[in-house]
Image (tube, rainbow, N blue to C red):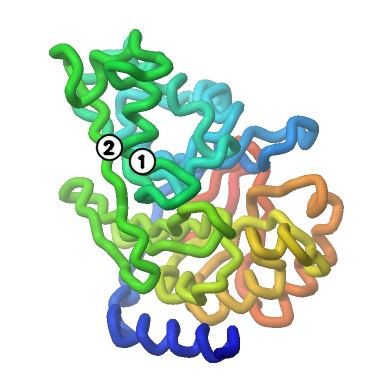
Amino acid sequence: MSDSFYRTIICLALLASIGTSSFANTDCEPGRVRLQVTGSGGPELNDKRAGSSYLIWLDGKARVLIDMGPGSSLNLERSGVNISDIEAVLFSHLHVDHSADFPALIKASFFTGRRHNLQVFGPDANRLMPSTEQFVARLIGNNGAFRYLSEYYENGQPSRWKVKAHSIPLSPLEVRHHTLNNHIMLSSIPVHHGPVAALAWRVQLAGCAITFSGDMSNRYKTLSRLAANSHLLVAHNAIPEQARGVARNLHMPPSEIGRIAAESGSKALLLSHRMLRTLEREPETSRYIRQFYKGPLRFAEDLAQFDVPFLHDNQ
């Protein structure tokens, strides 16, 4: 059975499972939602960027973090955020360049007036990676590497607040919805990132929708459905168009990003996870994307801020 036939079957099954109107077009309320890039780089230590991380602000308060790569905690400090306002951390996957600063957030929260639980969502386990619940337990659980923080673990000693971890099943065709509170809805779908358990995320608040691809090859051909009618699509530009082999098995080239942005009807596109092999190639990257997508296109820098809807940027 050919790979193209397999992808066709997946697409048809996905359409049947989530329908064509799962994410209706809604009015995004201007001035309420802002995205800040707290890490625009990858796993390299010489790209002069923090590892992947994004902060969503609602009405002037930080609400949701997507990934926490190395260096992102310093950018959180530079952003002026009150970390006790953060309600959830969403992990696309548990590679080091997406998760290394998470324990720093837990420790730093000790010095705040935080009173509410921190919700943590991420992928379930596969043969290579632990589940998100296991990841948290192995960091701050009663027998974890940082067990001195175990009072914040769900089964630890009494404390003002807890880390509540949720592992999202890896059924490749299923969009799952998670109500964070009365103002914020989260949606996720598994994506193909080689052998690594991985998710794409969609965050909806104040009528605005922001979708995060995470690292993915798009072999499942599902991201355009999750991103349907997004006001902003954040896609990872980790490889150039010519990449093959392992790099292509893990990541999507610019042309694939352009196709997804166009198919999803996303209102704007932000490219991040910018590695040395894609830095200085922005004109070439843009050219491949513009074959398919004609909307606003920007390249992420650490600490850059973007209004949603994408009216202007405050870089």
Q: Residue at x 43, y 56 (%)?
A: 199
Instruction: Report x, y in % for residue 125.
Output: 38, 48
In the image, 204 versus 41, the foreground residue is 41
Element assignment for label 1: helix
Looking at the rendered structure, the secondary structure element under dot 2 is: strand
Can you tell which quarter of the image residue 304 is in? top right
The foreground one among 244 and 118 is 244
* Residue positioned 52% across, 25% down in the render: 73
Which quarter of the rendering shows the C terminus?
A: top right
- Work out whether residue 118 or residue 248 is closer to the camera in this orientation and state it: 248
* Residue 299 screen position, x and y as percent: 69, 53
**Residue 126 position in % (x across, y down):** 42, 52
Residue at the disc numbered 1: 132
| Image position of 68 (left or right of 87) | right
What amino acid is labelled 2 in the image? Answer: Ala
Please state if 232 lies on the left or on the right of 303 as rendered: left
Residue highlighted by disc 2: 165
Q: Mark 1 or mark 2: which comes first in sequence?
A: 1
Mark 1 near mark 2, Cβ–Cβ under 8 Å?
yes
